[in-house]
Image (spheres, helix red, strand yellow):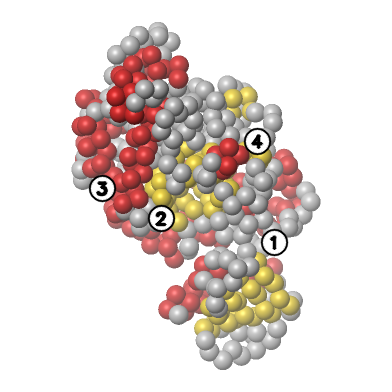
Protein backbone atom coordinates (compact mmCIF):
# COMPACT_ATOMS: atom_id res chain seq x y z
CA UNK A 1 0.00 0.00 0.00
CA UNK A 2 2.81 2.43 0.84
CA UNK A 3 4.38 1.72 -2.56
CA UNK A 4 1.09 2.46 -4.35
CA UNK A 5 0.68 5.72 -2.45
CA UNK A 6 4.22 6.72 -3.41
CA UNK A 7 3.47 5.93 -7.05
CA UNK A 8 0.29 7.99 -6.88
CA UNK A 9 2.26 10.93 -5.48
CA UNK A 10 4.91 10.64 -8.20
CA UNK A 11 2.28 10.40 -10.95
CA UNK A 12 0.44 13.43 -9.60
CA UNK A 13 3.73 15.36 -9.52
CA UNK A 14 4.34 14.45 -13.18
CA UNK A 15 1.02 15.81 -14.40
CA UNK A 16 0.95 19.31 -15.82
CA UNK A 17 -2.65 19.81 -14.65
CA UNK A 18 -3.87 19.34 -11.05
CA UNK A 19 -5.60 15.99 -11.62
CA UNK A 20 -6.11 14.17 -8.27
CA UNK A 21 -4.46 10.74 -8.05
CA UNK A 22 -5.91 8.63 -5.26
CA UNK A 23 -5.23 5.21 -3.72
CA UNK A 24 -8.03 3.25 -2.02
CA UNK A 25 -10.21 6.34 -1.69
CA UNK A 26 -13.55 7.29 -3.16
CA UNK A 27 -12.68 8.62 -6.60
CA UNK A 28 -14.53 11.64 -7.91
CA UNK A 29 -15.24 12.26 -11.61
CA UNK A 30 -12.01 13.27 -13.36
CA UNK A 31 -9.76 11.57 -10.79
CA UNK A 32 -7.10 8.97 -11.51
CA UNK A 33 -7.33 5.97 -9.21
CA UNK A 34 -4.59 3.37 -8.61
CA UNK A 35 -5.40 -0.12 -7.34
CA UNK A 36 -3.19 -3.10 -6.51
CA UNK A 37 -5.00 -6.33 -7.40
CA UNK A 38 -4.33 -10.01 -6.91
CA UNK A 39 -1.96 -12.01 -9.13
CA UNK A 40 -2.87 -12.25 -12.81
CA UNK A 41 -1.44 -14.86 -15.17
CA UNK A 42 -2.33 -12.61 -18.08
CA UNK A 43 -0.78 -9.38 -16.82
CA UNK A 44 2.22 -11.00 -15.11
CA UNK A 45 4.38 -8.85 -12.87
CA UNK A 46 4.67 -5.83 -15.17
CA UNK A 47 1.26 -5.60 -16.83
CA UNK A 48 -1.64 -3.32 -15.95
CA UNK A 49 -5.25 -2.50 -16.84
CA UNK A 50 -6.73 0.91 -17.60
CA UNK A 51 -10.46 1.52 -17.08
CA UNK A 52 -11.55 4.90 -18.40
CA UNK A 53 -14.97 6.24 -17.63
CA UNK A 54 -15.93 9.10 -15.34
CA UNK A 55 -12.68 8.29 -13.55
CA UNK A 56 -9.53 6.62 -14.82
CA UNK A 57 -8.46 3.54 -12.88
CA UNK A 58 -5.02 1.94 -13.15
CA UNK A 59 -5.03 -1.55 -11.67
CA UNK A 60 -2.16 -4.03 -11.58
CA UNK A 61 -0.90 -7.04 -9.64
CA UNK A 62 2.33 -5.24 -8.70
CA UNK A 63 3.70 -1.78 -8.08
CA UNK A 64 5.73 -2.16 -11.27
CA UNK A 65 2.53 -2.62 -13.25
CA UNK A 66 1.00 0.45 -11.63
CA UNK A 67 4.14 2.40 -12.51
CA UNK A 68 3.95 1.41 -16.18
CA UNK A 69 0.25 2.16 -16.25
CA UNK A 70 1.13 5.61 -14.97
CA UNK A 71 3.66 6.08 -17.78
CA UNK A 72 0.94 5.25 -20.31
CA UNK A 73 -1.44 7.74 -18.72
CA UNK A 74 1.23 10.44 -18.99
CA UNK A 75 1.68 9.57 -22.68
CA UNK A 76 -2.07 9.77 -23.28
CA UNK A 77 -2.36 13.10 -21.52
CA UNK A 78 0.58 14.45 -23.49
CA UNK A 79 -1.58 14.09 -26.60
CA UNK A 80 -4.85 15.39 -25.16
CA UNK A 81 -6.44 16.41 -21.88
CA UNK A 82 -9.29 14.00 -22.59
CA UNK A 83 -8.92 10.22 -22.87
CA UNK A 84 -11.52 8.10 -24.72
CA UNK A 85 -13.54 5.79 -22.48
CA UNK A 86 -12.91 2.07 -22.55
CA UNK A 87 -10.73 -0.70 -21.16
CA UNK A 88 -7.12 -1.51 -22.08
CA UNK A 89 -4.82 -4.27 -20.86
CA UNK A 90 -1.11 -4.05 -21.50
CA UNK A 91 1.91 -6.20 -20.62
CA UNK A 92 5.44 -6.76 -22.01
CA UNK A 93 6.35 -9.69 -24.20
CA UNK A 94 9.89 -9.97 -22.85
CA UNK A 95 10.95 -9.58 -19.22
CA UNK A 96 14.29 -7.83 -19.83
CA UNK A 97 14.50 -4.65 -21.87
CA UNK A 98 17.33 -2.24 -21.46
CA UNK A 99 20.63 -0.47 -21.99
CA UNK A 100 24.29 -1.41 -21.47
CA UNK A 101 26.71 1.48 -20.86
CA UNK A 102 30.48 1.05 -21.28
CA UNK A 103 31.60 3.28 -18.41
CA UNK A 104 35.22 2.13 -18.65
CA UNK A 105 36.29 3.49 -22.03
CA UNK A 106 34.13 6.63 -21.65
CA UNK A 107 33.58 8.70 -18.52
CA UNK A 108 29.88 9.21 -17.85
CA UNK A 109 28.86 11.40 -14.95
CA UNK A 110 26.40 10.28 -12.32
CA UNK A 111 23.93 12.91 -13.54
CA UNK A 112 24.20 11.45 -17.07
CA UNK A 113 23.36 7.99 -15.73
CA UNK A 114 20.43 9.37 -13.72
CA UNK A 115 18.99 11.00 -16.83
CA UNK A 116 19.24 7.71 -18.69
CA UNK A 117 17.39 5.90 -15.90
CA UNK A 118 14.53 8.38 -16.20
CA UNK A 119 14.49 7.87 -19.97
CA UNK A 120 14.46 4.10 -19.61
CA UNK A 121 11.53 4.37 -17.22
CA UNK A 122 9.56 6.58 -19.59
CA UNK A 123 10.01 3.94 -22.29
CA UNK A 124 9.09 1.08 -19.92
CA UNK A 125 12.62 -0.32 -20.24
CA UNK A 126 13.74 -2.01 -17.06
CA UNK A 127 17.47 -2.86 -17.15
CA UNK A 128 20.58 -0.67 -16.84
CA UNK A 129 23.78 -2.70 -17.29
CA UNK A 130 26.87 -0.78 -16.15
CA UNK A 131 30.14 -2.07 -17.66
CA UNK A 132 32.38 -0.70 -14.92
CA UNK A 133 35.82 -2.18 -15.66
CA UNK A 134 37.91 -3.00 -18.70
CA UNK A 135 41.47 -2.70 -20.00
CA UNK A 136 41.24 1.08 -20.23
CA UNK A 137 39.92 2.02 -16.78
CA UNK A 138 38.56 0.70 -13.49
CA UNK A 139 35.62 3.05 -13.14
CA UNK A 140 34.49 2.41 -9.57
CA UNK A 141 36.25 3.10 -6.29
CA UNK A 142 37.71 0.17 -4.37
CA UNK A 143 38.66 -0.26 -0.73
CA UNK A 144 40.34 -3.62 -1.35
CA UNK A 145 42.47 -2.42 -4.28
CA UNK A 146 42.62 1.39 -4.27
CA UNK A 147 45.65 1.39 -6.59
CA UNK A 148 43.64 0.09 -9.58
CA UNK A 149 41.01 2.84 -9.65
CA UNK A 150 41.04 5.08 -12.70
CA UNK A 151 40.22 8.77 -13.09
CA UNK A 152 36.73 10.08 -12.34
CA UNK A 153 35.39 6.83 -10.86
CA UNK A 154 31.92 6.24 -9.52
CA UNK A 155 32.04 6.50 -5.73
CA UNK A 156 29.93 4.45 -3.34
CA UNK A 157 27.81 7.55 -2.89
CA UNK A 158 27.33 7.84 -6.65
CA UNK A 159 26.24 4.20 -6.84
CA UNK A 160 23.75 4.73 -4.02
CA UNK A 161 22.23 7.70 -5.89
CA UNK A 162 21.94 5.60 -9.04
CA UNK A 163 20.39 2.69 -7.17
CA UNK A 164 17.84 4.87 -5.35
CA UNK A 165 16.51 6.39 -8.57
CA UNK A 166 16.59 3.04 -10.34
CA UNK A 167 14.53 1.47 -7.56
CA UNK A 168 12.00 4.29 -7.72
CA UNK A 169 11.71 3.94 -11.49
CA UNK A 170 11.60 0.13 -11.49
CA UNK A 171 14.93 -0.25 -13.31
CA UNK A 172 17.27 -3.10 -12.36
CA UNK A 173 20.95 -2.09 -12.24
CA UNK A 174 23.34 -4.87 -13.31
CA UNK A 175 27.02 -4.19 -12.54
CA UNK A 176 29.73 -5.77 -14.65
CA UNK A 177 33.22 -6.34 -13.27
CA UNK A 178 35.23 -7.98 -16.10
CA UNK A 179 37.20 -11.15 -15.37
CA UNK A 180 39.27 -13.10 -16.29
CA UNK A 181 39.95 -11.12 -19.50
CA UNK A 182 39.91 -7.39 -20.25
CA UNK A 183 41.72 -6.88 -16.94
CA UNK A 184 44.68 -4.75 -18.01
CA UNK A 185 43.65 -1.88 -15.72
CA UNK A 186 43.80 -4.22 -12.73
CA UNK A 187 46.81 -6.27 -13.81
CA UNK A 188 48.94 -3.23 -14.61
CA UNK A 189 49.08 -2.69 -10.85
CA UNK A 190 49.28 -6.40 -10.01
CA UNK A 191 51.50 -7.91 -12.74
CA UNK A 192 52.19 -11.02 -10.68
CA UNK A 193 48.62 -12.19 -11.41
CA UNK A 194 48.96 -12.01 -15.21
CA UNK A 195 48.62 -15.20 -17.25
CA UNK A 196 52.13 -15.19 -18.65
CA UNK A 197 53.02 -16.69 -22.04
CA UNK A 198 55.07 -19.83 -21.48
CA UNK A 199 54.83 -21.11 -25.06
CA UNK A 200 55.73 -19.60 -28.38
CA UNK A 201 54.28 -16.12 -28.88
CA UNK A 202 53.63 -15.35 -32.57
CA UNK A 203 55.09 -12.01 -33.69
CA UNK A 204 51.63 -10.87 -34.77
CA UNK A 205 50.13 -11.27 -31.27
CA UNK A 206 49.16 -7.92 -29.78
CA UNK A 207 50.80 -7.16 -26.46
CA UNK A 208 47.37 -6.19 -25.13
CA UNK A 209 46.22 -9.77 -25.39
CA UNK A 210 49.11 -11.12 -23.37
CA UNK A 211 48.77 -8.54 -20.56
CA UNK A 212 45.00 -8.40 -20.00
CA UNK A 213 44.45 -12.00 -18.84
CA UNK A 214 44.19 -13.17 -15.25
CA UNK A 215 46.10 -16.34 -14.40
CA UNK A 216 43.11 -18.47 -13.41
CA UNK A 217 45.45 -21.31 -12.42
CA UNK A 218 47.05 -19.27 -9.61
CA UNK A 219 45.62 -19.40 -6.05
CA UNK A 220 46.73 -15.79 -5.50
CA UNK A 221 44.66 -14.66 -8.51
CA UNK A 222 41.58 -16.48 -7.21
CA UNK A 223 42.07 -14.93 -3.79
CA UNK A 224 42.27 -11.46 -5.35
CA UNK A 225 39.11 -12.00 -7.37
CA UNK A 226 37.27 -13.24 -4.30
CA UNK A 227 38.20 -9.98 -2.55
CA UNK A 228 36.88 -7.99 -5.54
CA UNK A 229 33.62 -9.93 -5.57
CA UNK A 230 33.10 -9.77 -1.83
CA UNK A 231 33.63 -6.00 -1.90
CA UNK A 232 31.18 -5.19 -4.67
CA UNK A 233 28.48 -7.88 -4.44
CA UNK A 234 26.87 -6.36 -1.30
CA UNK A 235 26.88 -2.87 -2.87
CA UNK A 236 24.40 -3.81 -5.59
CA UNK A 237 21.08 -5.22 -4.29
CA UNK A 238 19.75 -6.40 -7.66
CA UNK A 239 19.35 -10.08 -8.53
CA UNK A 240 22.04 -10.13 -11.27
CA UNK A 241 25.82 -9.92 -11.37
CA UNK A 242 27.88 -9.75 -14.58
CA UNK A 243 31.48 -10.97 -14.90
CA UNK A 244 31.93 -10.39 -18.63
CA UNK A 245 34.31 -13.28 -19.55
CA UNK A 246 34.48 -12.26 -23.22
CA UNK A 247 37.61 -12.48 -25.35
CA UNK A 248 39.76 -14.20 -22.75
CA UNK A 249 41.34 -16.78 -25.01
CA UNK A 250 40.89 -18.23 -28.47
CA UNK A 251 41.85 -21.80 -29.42
CA UNK A 252 44.59 -20.35 -31.61
CA UNK A 253 46.15 -18.87 -28.46
CA UNK A 254 46.15 -22.11 -26.46
CA UNK A 255 49.77 -22.93 -27.47
CA UNK A 256 50.88 -19.56 -26.08
CA UNK A 257 49.64 -20.59 -22.62
CA UNK A 258 50.23 -24.36 -22.35
CA UNK A 259 49.95 -24.17 -18.56
CA UNK A 260 46.17 -23.88 -18.97
CA UNK A 261 45.94 -27.30 -20.59
CA UNK A 262 48.18 -28.79 -17.91
CA UNK A 263 46.01 -27.22 -15.20
CA UNK A 264 42.76 -28.39 -16.82
CA UNK A 265 43.93 -32.00 -17.13
CA UNK A 266 45.23 -32.05 -13.56
CA UNK A 267 41.95 -30.61 -12.22
CA UNK A 268 39.35 -32.22 -14.47
CA UNK A 269 41.01 -35.31 -15.91
CA UNK A 270 42.17 -36.62 -19.26
CA UNK A 271 40.49 -34.95 -22.22
CA UNK A 272 40.09 -31.62 -20.46
CA UNK A 273 41.01 -28.52 -22.46
CA UNK A 274 41.85 -24.88 -21.72
CA UNK A 275 38.14 -24.18 -22.33
CA UNK A 276 37.37 -26.40 -19.34
CA UNK A 277 39.74 -24.32 -17.21
CA UNK A 278 37.90 -21.17 -18.30
CA UNK A 279 34.50 -22.73 -17.63
CA UNK A 280 35.71 -23.93 -14.25
CA UNK A 281 36.65 -20.36 -13.36
CA UNK A 282 33.23 -19.10 -14.51
CA UNK A 283 31.54 -21.75 -12.36
CA UNK A 284 33.74 -20.80 -9.40
CA UNK A 285 32.59 -17.18 -9.69
CA UNK A 286 29.03 -18.42 -10.13
CA UNK A 287 29.25 -20.19 -6.77
CA UNK A 288 30.31 -16.96 -5.03
CA UNK A 289 27.60 -14.96 -6.79
CA UNK A 290 24.91 -17.51 -5.90
CA UNK A 291 26.05 -17.45 -2.26
CA UNK A 292 24.99 -13.79 -2.32
CA UNK A 293 21.57 -14.68 -3.72
CA UNK A 294 22.32 -13.42 -7.23
CA UNK A 295 22.34 -14.84 -10.76
CA UNK A 296 25.51 -14.66 -12.85
CA UNK A 297 25.56 -13.27 -16.38
CA UNK A 298 28.31 -13.60 -19.01
CA UNK A 299 28.92 -12.74 -22.66
CA UNK A 300 28.56 -15.68 -25.02
CA UNK A 301 31.93 -16.08 -26.73
CA UNK A 302 33.66 -18.36 -24.18
CA UNK A 303 30.85 -20.87 -23.65
CA UNK A 304 31.80 -23.46 -26.29
CA UNK A 305 34.79 -25.73 -26.88
CA UNK A 306 34.39 -27.72 -23.70
CA UNK A 307 35.69 -31.24 -23.21
CA UNK A 308 34.49 -32.02 -19.68
CA UNK A 309 33.18 -28.91 -17.87
CA UNK A 310 30.17 -27.01 -19.19
CA UNK A 311 29.23 -23.58 -17.86
CA UNK A 312 26.59 -23.94 -15.15
CA UNK A 313 23.06 -23.86 -16.58
CA UNK A 314 21.89 -21.21 -14.11
CA UNK A 315 24.20 -18.63 -15.76
CA UNK A 316 22.45 -16.14 -18.07
CA UNK A 317 24.11 -15.77 -21.49
CA UNK A 318 24.28 -12.33 -23.11
CA UNK A 319 24.66 -13.20 -26.79
CA UNK A 320 26.63 -10.54 -28.66
CA UNK A 321 28.55 -12.15 -31.52
CA UNK A 322 28.74 -15.19 -33.76
CA UNK A 323 32.53 -15.00 -33.99
CA UNK A 324 35.30 -13.28 -32.07
CA UNK A 325 38.99 -13.54 -33.01
CA UNK A 326 39.75 -13.45 -29.27
CA UNK A 327 37.16 -16.00 -28.11
CA UNK A 328 35.79 -19.32 -29.33
CA UNK A 329 36.36 -19.94 -33.03
CA UNK A 330 32.71 -20.87 -33.46
CA UNK A 331 30.28 -19.69 -30.81
CA UNK A 332 27.34 -21.74 -29.63
CA UNK A 333 24.13 -20.66 -31.34
CA UNK A 334 21.33 -19.03 -29.32
CA UNK A 335 19.03 -21.91 -30.27
CA UNK A 336 21.48 -24.48 -28.91
CA UNK A 337 22.07 -22.50 -25.72
CA UNK A 338 18.33 -22.33 -25.04
CA UNK A 339 17.92 -26.02 -25.89
CA UNK A 340 20.59 -26.81 -23.27
CA UNK A 341 18.66 -24.90 -20.62
CA UNK A 342 20.37 -21.50 -20.66
CA UNK A 343 18.45 -18.23 -20.62
CA UNK A 344 19.67 -15.88 -23.34
CA UNK A 345 19.53 -12.11 -23.85
CA UNK A 346 19.78 -10.78 -27.41
CA UNK A 347 22.62 -8.24 -27.29
CA UNK A 348 23.69 -8.98 -30.85
CA UNK A 349 25.95 -6.55 -32.66
CA UNK A 350 23.18 -5.95 -35.18
CA UNK A 351 21.07 -4.06 -34.34
CA UNK A 352 21.96 -3.56 -30.69
CA UNK A 353 25.38 -1.87 -30.84
CA UNK A 354 25.91 1.85 -30.59
CA UNK A 355 29.62 2.30 -31.22
CA UNK A 356 32.15 3.77 -33.61
CA UNK A 357 32.51 2.22 -37.05
CA UNK A 358 35.08 -0.58 -37.21
CA UNK A 359 36.41 -0.75 -40.75
CA UNK A 360 33.48 -1.55 -43.01
CA UNK A 361 31.24 -2.46 -40.07
CA UNK A 362 28.76 0.23 -39.13
CA UNK A 363 28.72 1.05 -35.46
CA UNK A 364 25.09 2.14 -35.49
CA UNK A 365 22.26 0.26 -37.14
CA UNK A 366 19.92 1.98 -39.60
CA UNK A 367 16.70 2.39 -37.63
CA UNK A 368 14.19 2.30 -40.51
CA UNK A 369 15.48 -1.17 -41.39
CA UNK A 370 15.49 -2.27 -37.76
CA UNK A 371 11.94 -1.06 -37.22
CA UNK A 372 10.52 -2.89 -40.22
CA UNK A 373 12.89 -5.84 -40.52
CA UNK A 374 14.13 -7.07 -37.13
CA UNK A 375 12.58 -8.91 -34.20
CA UNK A 376 13.94 -9.76 -30.76
CA UNK A 377 14.21 -13.47 -31.57
CA UNK A 378 16.62 -12.77 -34.48
CA UNK A 379 20.31 -12.82 -33.52
CA UNK A 380 23.10 -11.36 -35.62
CA UNK A 381 26.73 -10.50 -35.03
CA UNK A 382 29.98 -9.28 -36.52
CA UNK A 383 32.28 -11.57 -38.49
CA UNK A 384 35.72 -10.33 -39.53
CA UNK A 385 34.67 -6.93 -40.79
CA UNK A 386 31.24 -7.69 -42.21
CA UNK A 387 27.80 -8.14 -40.78
CA UNK A 388 26.55 -11.70 -40.84
CA UNK A 389 24.06 -11.97 -43.69
CA UNK A 390 21.82 -14.62 -42.18
CA UNK A 391 20.02 -14.25 -38.88
CA UNK A 392 20.03 -16.99 -36.27
CA UNK A 393 16.47 -17.34 -35.05
CA UNK A 394 14.88 -18.85 -31.98
CA UNK A 395 11.14 -19.20 -31.38
CA UNK A 396 9.78 -15.78 -30.44
CA UNK A 397 7.80 -17.33 -27.59
CA UNK A 398 10.70 -19.34 -26.16
CA UNK A 399 10.81 -18.97 -22.36
CA UNK A 400 14.60 -19.03 -22.62
CA UNK A 401 14.63 -15.76 -24.61
CA UNK A 402 14.82 -13.00 -22.00
CA UNK A 403 14.66 -9.96 -24.26
CA UNK A 404 17.18 -7.50 -25.67
CA UNK A 405 19.39 -4.55 -24.78
CA UNK A 406 21.15 -1.72 -26.60
CA UNK A 407 24.91 -1.59 -25.90
CA UNK A 408 26.94 1.63 -25.93
CA UNK A 409 30.61 0.75 -26.49
CA UNK A 410 33.41 3.31 -26.44
CA UNK A 411 35.46 5.08 -27.29
CA UNK A 412 33.07 7.21 -29.31
CA UNK A 413 33.96 10.21 -31.44
CA UNK A 414 31.26 12.30 -29.75
CA UNK A 415 30.51 13.85 -26.38
CA UNK A 416 28.45 12.16 -23.69
CA UNK A 417 25.63 14.62 -24.42
CA UNK A 418 25.72 13.65 -28.09
CA UNK A 419 25.60 10.00 -27.13
CA UNK A 420 22.54 10.64 -24.98
CA UNK A 421 20.79 12.26 -27.95
CA UNK A 422 22.05 9.61 -30.37
CA UNK A 423 20.67 6.64 -28.45
CA UNK A 424 17.19 8.16 -27.99
CA UNK A 425 15.67 6.77 -31.20
CA UNK A 426 17.43 3.41 -30.75
CA UNK A 427 15.91 3.03 -27.29
CA UNK A 428 12.48 3.97 -28.58
CA UNK A 429 12.61 1.25 -31.25
CA UNK A 430 13.97 -1.25 -28.73
CA UNK A 431 11.11 -0.42 -26.37
CA UNK A 432 8.59 -1.05 -29.14
CA UNK A 433 10.20 -4.35 -30.12
CA UNK A 434 10.70 -5.76 -26.62
CA UNK A 435 7.33 -4.70 -25.23
CA UNK A 436 5.80 -6.44 -28.20
CA UNK A 437 2.56 -4.52 -28.60
CA UNK A 438 1.27 -4.03 -32.16
CA UNK A 439 3.42 -1.44 -33.98
CA UNK A 440 1.70 1.94 -34.08
CA UNK A 441 2.79 2.59 -37.67
CA UNK A 442 3.91 0.57 -40.68
CA UNK A 443 6.91 2.74 -41.55
CA UNK A 444 9.60 4.13 -39.27
CA UNK A 445 8.67 7.70 -40.19
CA UNK A 446 5.20 7.09 -38.81
CA UNK A 447 6.64 5.57 -35.65
CA UNK A 448 8.80 8.63 -34.97
CA UNK A 449 5.79 10.89 -35.51
CA UNK A 450 3.70 8.88 -33.07
CA UNK A 451 6.53 8.81 -30.53
CA UNK A 452 6.74 12.60 -30.58
CA UNK A 453 2.98 12.86 -30.13
CA UNK A 454 3.11 10.97 -26.85
CA UNK A 455 6.20 12.80 -25.60
CA UNK A 456 8.72 9.99 -26.11
CA UNK A 457 12.20 10.28 -27.61
CA UNK A 458 12.08 9.43 -31.31
Instruction: Look at discs 1 and 3 and give the one toward the viewer.
Output: 3
The earlier-in-sequence mark between 4 and 1 is 4
Q: Tell me if label 4 and label 1 are in contact, CB under 8 Å.
A: no
Q: Is 266 situated left or right of 82 in this image? A: left
Q: CA distance from mark 4 to mark 3?
A: 38 Å
Q: Residues within 10 Å of mark 4 (few under 14, many from 20)?
A: some
Residue 233, above or below 65: above
Mark sitting on residue 453: 1
C-alpha span from label 1 to label 3: 47 Å
Q: Earlier in the sequence, mark 1 or mark 2?
A: 2
> Which residue corresponds to mark 2?
239
Query: Cα distance, mark 4 to mark 1?
Result: 35 Å
Labels 1, 2: front one:
2
- Residue at which label 4 appears: 392
Task: Point out residue 54 in the picture as x, y percentages from the top left corner.
Answer: 69, 86
Estimate how packed mark 2 is, as few (under 14), some (14 to 19) or many (20 or more) residues with alpha carbons within 10 Å.
Answer: some
Secondary structure of the residue carrying numbered label 2: loop
The x, y position of residue 426, in whole percent, is 61, 46
Image-quadrant location for residue 223: top left
Q: Secondary structure at mark 3?
A: helix
Q: Quadrant of residue 104?
A: top left
Camera-nearest residue between 27 and 238: 238
Amino acid sequence: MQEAQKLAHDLAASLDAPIPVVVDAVAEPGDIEMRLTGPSARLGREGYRLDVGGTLTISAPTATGLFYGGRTVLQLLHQSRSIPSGVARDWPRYPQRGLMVDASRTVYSTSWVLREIRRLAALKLNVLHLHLTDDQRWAITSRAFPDIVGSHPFTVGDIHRILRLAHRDHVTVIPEIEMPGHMAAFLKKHPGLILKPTGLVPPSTSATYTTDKLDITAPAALAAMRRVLEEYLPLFPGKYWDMGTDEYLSPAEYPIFPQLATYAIAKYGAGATPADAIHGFINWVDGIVRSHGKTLRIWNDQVGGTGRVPVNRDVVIEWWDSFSPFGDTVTVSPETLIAHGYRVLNAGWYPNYYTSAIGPVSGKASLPGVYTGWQVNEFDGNEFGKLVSSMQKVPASSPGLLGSALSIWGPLDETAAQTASGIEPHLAVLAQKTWGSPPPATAYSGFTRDARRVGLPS
